[in-house]
Amino acid sequence: MFMRSFAGPTTMAGVLVLALGAAFAPVASAQGRVGLPDFTDLYEKAGPTVVSIDVTQKSRRTRGMPELSEDDPFYEFFRRFGQVPPRRGPEREPEAQAVGSGFIIGSDGHVITNAHVVDGADEVTVRLSDKREFRAKVLGADKRTDIALLKIEAKDLPKVTIGDPDKLRVGEWVVAIGKPFGLENTMTAGIVSAKGRDLPQENLVPFIQTDVAINPGNSGGPLFNMKGEVVGINSLIYSRTGGYMGLAFAVPIDIAMNAVTQLRDKGRVTRGRIGVQIQEMTKETADAFGLKNANGALVNNVEKDGPAAKAGVQSGDIILKVEGRDVHASTELPRIITQIRPGTKVSLTVWRKGTTKEIPVVIAEMKEDVTAAASPRKGGKEQPKEKPKPNKMGLVLNDLSDEQRKALDLASGGVVVDDVVGVVRGNVQPGDVILAIIQHGAPVEVKSAAQVNDYLAKLDNSAPVTFQMRRGDQTFYATLKSGTG
């Protein structure tokens, strides 16, 4: 499971084991003898820029009546009616404490950490490497990127150097400095395991994956390259035990700094949107649309009256570039668009019916997260007098009734998948509605079940077919293959 590397209320309970063994020997290679990297200079230079963060949150208690002392005249009033109010005593309200990490980005006291570290905090204390402590003010937080900006009243502080995560290479050494389990200024090292990782519920952040030892308390701390530049913010770990298992994830620093700039300037983060629903391209889908490579984002639905619709973007378009920047995968498109300031006009390079087109679109502001969930198909399925036989692909198809088309808001055409027989490879299930067949890179409207069955009958056994389909409120493209091919 994915966990925030954030230490909540905890005590340091465990056993420290001393392991004695042979000293590391230099590693031999074809190019010669190569030693392990030396992190001492990096630690001395970058260590003072890293801070420890202590968070205090008062426990909230729901009270049915106010606290009163016994000499208060209202105390006797409540007591006579059988309701003894809580006594006002000198005891302190219970508190929950937790720890995290952060780093200084401005000599005037600006500090970055994770949003989840300070979420719900009543008091945030920043402790520097020289043991000075400051009460911090949370200037703003952005949960989508998990970034928070703090401010402490201090001057002439050491600050980090911002690096370029795009220049990171898989296999490159990186180090983290933070406060795992409350142990301040702890350095751990590892390599970049992967870049651009997509994680569940985290679709706007292309995470840097590392095998650096990250544990609760490391959250919000910096990830350094060997030049001592910050390239990421340690945020998540994958763990079945709650501790380090070799999979750690950092928010790239360029994503974080974009959020920081907006938090510092206006206290909140705005994101762009164009109003399209997209899906991943596959080799089979690319072949169906006449593309050599499975790059880009396939548009399966365009929001009515949205920026893309107003610009002329259509379902079935494949967005290849945004302002000349390649869209290698569908996951890259929302990351690119959300980083663009609302109101900006950009050019989309799209593939449509075998040719490329340049479409100017004005970016709108993302107001809120909208998750379109597939809903049950509206309109009861009209039972045919005789159940049709499966076609060559193993699909049992039926024409839509007028009532079904009306419920689905279809002017004409469309056939429903009543059943899937045998092994059919691809995203299809009973209740799906086939809207079009992609032929020679362009959609051909499906008007009847017979039309689809005749088309499939002419295909080779191993030939794939790409459909435009409808499932509930979702429109998407699916490439199917017969399991016997």
Image (spheres, rainbow, N blue to C red):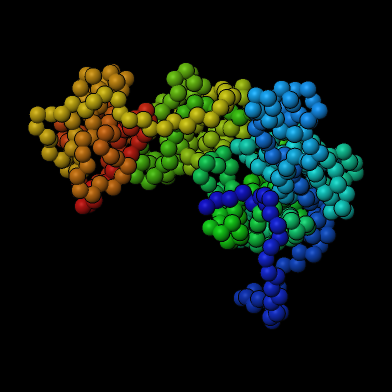
Q: Is residue 482 left or right of residue 469?
A: left
| Residue 264 visible in the displayed image | no
| Residue 295 visible in the displayed image | yes
Name of the residue lying farthest toward the front: 80
**Residue 419: x and y, percent?**
21, 39
Which image quadrant is residue 324 in?
top right
Q: Is residue 480 left or right of residue 328?
A: left
Q: Is 75 drawn above or below residue 18 in the view shown? A: above
Q: Residue at x 12, y 39 (%)?
A: 389
Q: Residue at x 16, y 35 (%)?
A: 454
**Residue 400: x and y, percent?**
21, 25
Q: How many dots with numbers? A: 0
Viewer-nearest residue: 382 or 477: 382
Q: Residue at x 72, y 49 (%)?
A: 99
Q: Residue at x 18, y 26 (%)?
A: 382
Q: Is 278 drawn above or below residue 193 in the view shown? A: above
Viewer-nearest residue: 83 or 115: 83
Name of the residue lying farthest toward the right: 156
Which image quadrant is residue 408 in?
top left
Q: Is residue 435 left or right of residue 240?
A: left
Q: Is 77 drawn above or below residue 168 in the view shown? A: above
Q: Is residue 396 left or right of residue 249?
A: left
**Residue 302: x and y, percent?**
43, 25
**Residue 71: x and y, percent?**
81, 28
